[in-house]
Image (cartoon, rainbow, N blue to C red):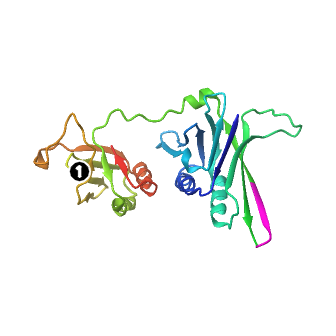
Amino acid sequence: MKLKVVVEKPVELRKCLSFLVGLRRMCVFRFTEQQLIIVSSGLNEPTIWCKLDSSIFQLYEVDSTRNNVIPFEINIEPLLQVLRNYEKSNVSSSLVIRLQRRPSNGGEIKNKAAASLALFYTEQISMTSNVSHSFNVPVRLLKMDSDLRIVEPAMDSMKLAMKLPMRIVPLLKRLERYRTSDLISIVGNQTGQLKFVIEEEQRKIVVQWKEQLDVLPDDEDSVPQSWDSSVLRPVSLKVKLKHWNVGAKLMELNAILLII
């Protein structure tokens, strides 16, 4: 088993971990031949999948007997701190990340799942001197059956999909104010109209986006532009407000987000 990646500017990785660490510290990293998949999940909680293409790394080497897939569980908090320190430092080298086994005191490996993610970089502190930094973040290698149970949610049933522009972020942030309500209704239609309905004990709040959003085309059921929006049946979905707020924060990572 071999895992070694080198990255000069870990901006995408750091942004992904910065978002996830606010939800959960423990995540699953799955290195494949083409990409790094980061999965954050919890019992009866939203599951988040982040995919980073191998092209963001200067060097990307993944080799294993399991179709060149290496999965492990990791506490992303110390890893994120290393990435932040690296970006703030006057570095004279790229960041090297390597997976290595953790031997016991006697030199023999008793726990085959125990390993660590080793990180290295060099910082230039003056014109004539450098300091080498090295860190080890413990990880737990996943067995094949455990890895196979982690399945990406399918999107085979889609009633409505809209493209959300970045300028809608202030409206989404307004929804975070209403913390006394448990549920939020998301209502949209094929003309690109979108609104949010929150019902509290004494009042009903309706927050609507005034512009028409782009709707993903549907070849089987296309809607002529001349149709009156009043004859289109809206699609409504009720979710937990706290879960919606988590999903809305993904706008910080993506210029375009689909709502289904």
Q: Which residue is mark 1?
A: 192
Query: What amino acid type is highlighted by mark number 1?
Result: Gly
- Local crowd size for mark 1, using a 10 Å CA cut-off: few (<14), some (14–19), many (≥20): some
Identity of the residue furthest to the right in this view: 106
Q: Between 36 and 6, which is closer to the camera in this rendering?
A: 6
Question: In the rendered view, would you say 16 is above or below 217?
Answer: below
Q: What residue is rendered at 37% in x and 50% in y?
A: 257
Picture quarter with the N terminus: top right
Q: Is residue 33 above or below residue 92?
A: above
Q: Tell me if 20 is positioned left or right of 201 in this view.
A: right
- In the rendered structure, does residue 130 fall within the stretch colored magenta? yes
Q: Quadrant of the C terminus?
A: top left
Going by the picture, which residue comes out furthest to the bottom?
A: 127
- Magenta span: predominant SS is strand
| Region rendered in magenta | 127-134
- The residue depicted at 25 percent of the width and 42 percent of the height is 217
Q: Give the structural element (helix, strand or loop) at label 1.
A: loop
Residue 188 coordinates in the image, percent (x, y):
25, 48
Q: Nearer the viewer, residue 98 or 57?
A: 57
Q: Is residue 137 magenta?
A: no
Residue 253 position within the rendered picture, expressed as x and y whole percent measured from the top left: 46, 55
Residue 170 image-quadrant placement: bottom left
Residue shown at 81%/34% (left/top)?
A: 109
Please identify the quarter of the rendering in which residue 238 is found. top left
Up the image or down, 118 lies above or below 87; here it is above
Q: Residue 222 at what x, y percent from top left?
A: 19, 39
Query: Which residue is located at x 70 percent, y 45 percent?
Result: 98
Percent across and percent down for residue 246 are 44, 52
Q: How many marks?
A: 1
Residue toward you, 202 or 122? 122
